[in-house]
Image (cartoon, rainbow, N blue to C red):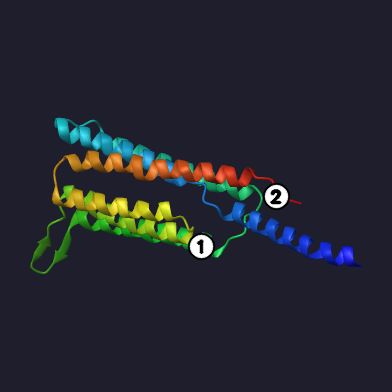
Amino acid sequence: MTSQTASRPEEELQYIRKVIDDSRAAFVEDGRPYILWGLLVAVGMGISYISVLFQRDFYTAYVWATLILFGWGSMFYFYRKQSKQEARVKSIIDRIQSSIWVACGIGFGLFLLLISSGVNLTDGRVPAIHPFYVCSIVSMILGIAYFLSGVAHDLRWLRNVGFAWWAGAIVMYIWPTVHVLGIYAAMLIVFQVIPGIILQRRYKRITSQPAEA
């Protein structure tokens, strides 16, 4: 009786530890969307920067259309493949994470739509925001997304990436030149692609750890 009583708390602790490990592996961010969109948008911004810098059209519109279609196609393939695998339980963190980026994505879309056309008023048309300021404002929104994602995942370094985006937004706002396109492309590599790689390595490390029996 004494041996069974002593072993029961240890078995319960092992069971609790296994549940925690399984939950952590199920809800960890894998970072692939960060890497995918960071690279695609960085390439698009780089082509736009070179086109403006040299005053030549390097088929920028076609490049952007191809990159966006490729990005959405890749995301569709990724989520379809993921849905065919073992069902993943949706946690509150999953819902918060997806809501953050969906909300910011809607914000991006509305902002770009409005500034590209201006706003019709009774006394005329409000001119669109100058393109040099677009990167600054988008960086502010990205800062919000990264800050909230870091808080949701309890990752201080990911939260601090938001401060980096805000700092970059300030620099691009007070220095509105053609070079903001290059700065924004570089920021995507440093503050989106690299964090995505770190998240993906963390995901592989956590999911590859065998759960204790």
Pointer 1: residues within 10 angstroms few (<14), some, or many (20+)?
Answer: few
116 with respect to 124 (left or right): right
Circle 1 — which element?
Answer: helix
In which quadrant of the rendered image does the N terminus lie? bottom right
Q: Is residue 41 above or below residue 11?
A: above
Q: Is residue 97 above or below residue 51?
A: below
Q: Can you identify the residue that label 2 sits on?
A: 211
Q: CA distance from mark 2 to mark 1?
A: 25 Å
Q: Residue at x 78, y 65 (%)?
A: 9
Identity of the amino acid at label 1?
A: Arg
- Comparing labels 2 and 1, the label whose residue is closer to the camera: 2
Of the residues under marks 2 and 1, which one precedes in the sequence?
1
Q: Quadrant of residue 17?
A: bottom right
Picture residue at 62% right of the left edge, 59% below the top? 89
| Residue 47 in view | yes
Camera-side residue of 150 and 131: 150
Residue 106 horizontal/vertical position (percent): 35, 59
Which numbered circle lies on residue 31?
none
Expressed as whole percent of the image width and height from the top left, the position of residue 99 reads: 44, 62
Amino acid at dot 2: Ala
Element on which disc 2 rests: loop
- Image position of 182 (left or right of 176): right
Q: Position of residue 164 (x, y in %)?
A: 31, 50
* Residue 95 tag number: 1
Q: Badge 2 local density, few (<14 within 10 Å), some, or many (20+)?
A: some
Q: Is residue 47 left or right of residue 129?
A: right
Q: Give how far across and how far down residue 39 sits, in percent.
A: 38, 38
What residue lies at 46% left-to-right and 55% top-to-bottom? 155
Quadrant of the image occupied by residue 102? bottom left
